[in-house]
Image (cartoon, helix red, strand yellow):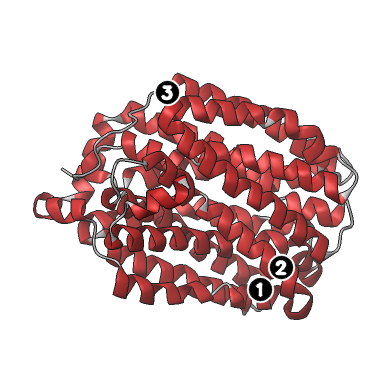
Amino acid sequence: MEFIGHFRRLTPVQRNTFIACFLGWSLDAFDFFILVFCVSALAAQFHMKPSEILEANFLTLAMRPVGAFLFGLMADRFGRRPTLMVDIIAYSVFELGSAFAPSFKSFLLMRALFGIAMGGEWGVGAALAFETLPAEGRGFFSGLLQEGYATGYLFASLIYFSVFSYVGWRGMFVIGALPAFLVIYIRTKVEESPAWLQGKTVRDAESRLWRDIKSNVGLFLFVVLLMFAFNSFSHGTQDIYPTFLQKNMHFTPKTVGLIAIVYNIGALLGGVLFGTWSEKIGRRRAIVIAALLSIPAIPLFAFSHTAPMLALGAFLMQFMVQGAWGVIPAHLNELSPPAVRGTLPGFAYQVGNLLSSRNSVIQAKVAEGSYGGSFAPVLGWTVLIVAALVALVTGLGRERRGADLSNTT
């Protein structure tokens, strides 16, 4: 009922804007997570180890700060709406290019270019959404918007479950080009951010960005560290999990896809619940609680021996991981200086992401080298260390719950 109530209070413009930003992030994540389901198939195609294939995942993550910076500047200078459309077209084109890569080197190039486009979507979409939405219910919308990421993973799970056996990894990436059609919806239904329109006559985005970073260097470095911890938390529990289920548990594509569907439903529920709860108990407290509650789920998540128990463990894990993440869009936009809200949150987010970008490669190499190819101990240690880091860094920071996001000057 609360879900329906929040949406009823939105104007048609606000509702269309939120839907567009949610789908933009969902389909961006959908395109990213297609790769994690195809690691084993790509390894067989190119005669490589999973750790070598995961270099493509590393390149995507490592290039995201470039996209956050470039598309963020475009958003602050030319507007959120046109920048979002360009970004969605770009990541769809590079996803399609990945499908037709004739060699692993060309595949790596496509994933690097995709990473640039992927890096631009979060900051631009979040700025457009929160500058358009009312302050009331911001925690709820933060949780729901961030779980566009889990929704994208869920889409990828459903496609993998349904059609991978028929279309293979190349067909999966062809399907990944479909998000380009979202641009039609944005072009016809979405208006520019009123906050950006209000401040556009006094904007010098690039100079304001560096000036604001210099004057808020402590905040910028804190957000980078926070996002390093958060990206290690999410990618450390998600990116190699399908490979763990395929290689160690020897599950079929349908079983792997079904387990992924289950844990992404958990992610969606956790993000919305903790995002909404953060309105009452505070952003930091909600994040700390979610992060610490992921630790008791480790035995079920990594060391169960049956598909139902692994699905339950993964459901609980992603409920907590994305519960913590559900607070982040509102939290970072509230902390950001107004004039560079389109750039600074996304840029800091992606710099933190860069610092954690080799996470899956390191996990795979440790599993291959120290645990005889077993991913379970690596997954367990990752959660224990990173969850504690997320809780510690968050607790040491500050928050500006309820800050005014109605202007950009």
The residue that appears at 52% across and 50% down in the rendered structure is 147
Which mark is drawn over residue 371? none
Which of these two is toward me, 151 or 380? 151
Q: Tag 3: residue type?
A: Gly
For disc 2, the neighbor class at 10 Å (few under 14, some 14 to 19, many from 20) is many
For disc 1, the neighbor class at 10 Å (few under 14, some 14 to 19, many from 20) is many
Q: Would you name the residue on which mark 1 appears?
A: 172
Q: Residue furthest top?
A: 396
Q: Would you name the residue on which mark 2 appears?
A: 160
Image location of residue 348, percent across then percent down: 40, 41
Res 279 seen here: yes
Q: CA distance from mark 1 to mark 2?
A: 8 Å
Q: Are marks 3 and 1 in contact (CB under 8 Å)?
A: no
Q: Secondary structure at mark 1?
A: helix
Image location of residue 290, percent across then percent down: 59, 31
Image location of residue 186, percent across then percent down: 34, 70
Which of these two is toward me, 215 or 382? 382
Q: Would you name the residue on which mark 3 appears?
A: 397
The residue that appears at 71% across and 73% down in the rendered structure is 169
